[in-house]
Amino acid sequence: MSESEFETRTVRPYALTGGRVRSDRSDYPLEALVELLPDGVAGQGLTPEKRAILQHASHGYISVAELSALLHLPIGVVRVVVSDLVDAGYVRVHASDPVEVRTGQSPALSLSVLESVLNGISAL
């Protein structure tokens, strides 16, 4: 990778988020689903990345992780940009709240942690 390519890849995410690394709602889980709202169909005056998110969401629900992969952007950047689209009323994000499971340990482990452990063991 040349020096100019490195600089472009380093500066671009910073510029996309306006220098923000998170917003009030940018803690969406990877599996959170983005849904296009009727106001998002027009999407006039948006950045190419925001228009791309609206385009991908127009085909149905799409996860934050899928958007990150399709746009070749870091997950944190996608979370901030999606949060901006939520604030503008273009999309809605559906995220499930973690379910607390009593395991005899204190504090309780979330169901998502237990599922991750099970998936890791199954992969062995």
Image (cartoon, rainbow, N blue to C red):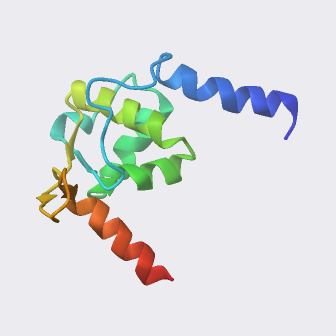
Q: On the picture, is 31 further left or further right than 39?
A: right
In the image, residue 74 above or below residue 62: above
Percent from the top left, x then y, of residue 116? 36, 66
Say above or below: 101 vs 86.
below
For this orientation, the residue located farthest to the top is 18
Residue at the right extreme of this rendering: 2
Going by the image, does 62 lie left or right of 49?
A: left
Residue 29: % across, % down: 31, 48
In x, y percent, where is residue 46?
40, 25
Out of 29 and 102, give the one closest to the viewer: 102
- Residue 94 image offset from top left, x and y in percent: 19, 49
Q: Give the residue drawn at x 47%, y 43%.
A: 75
In the image, 48 versus 14, the foreground residue is 14
Seen in the image, is 25 located left or right of residue 73?
Answer: left
Residue lying at 44% horizontally and 73% vertically, measured from the top left:
120
Q: In the rendered image, which quarter contains the N terminus?
A: top right
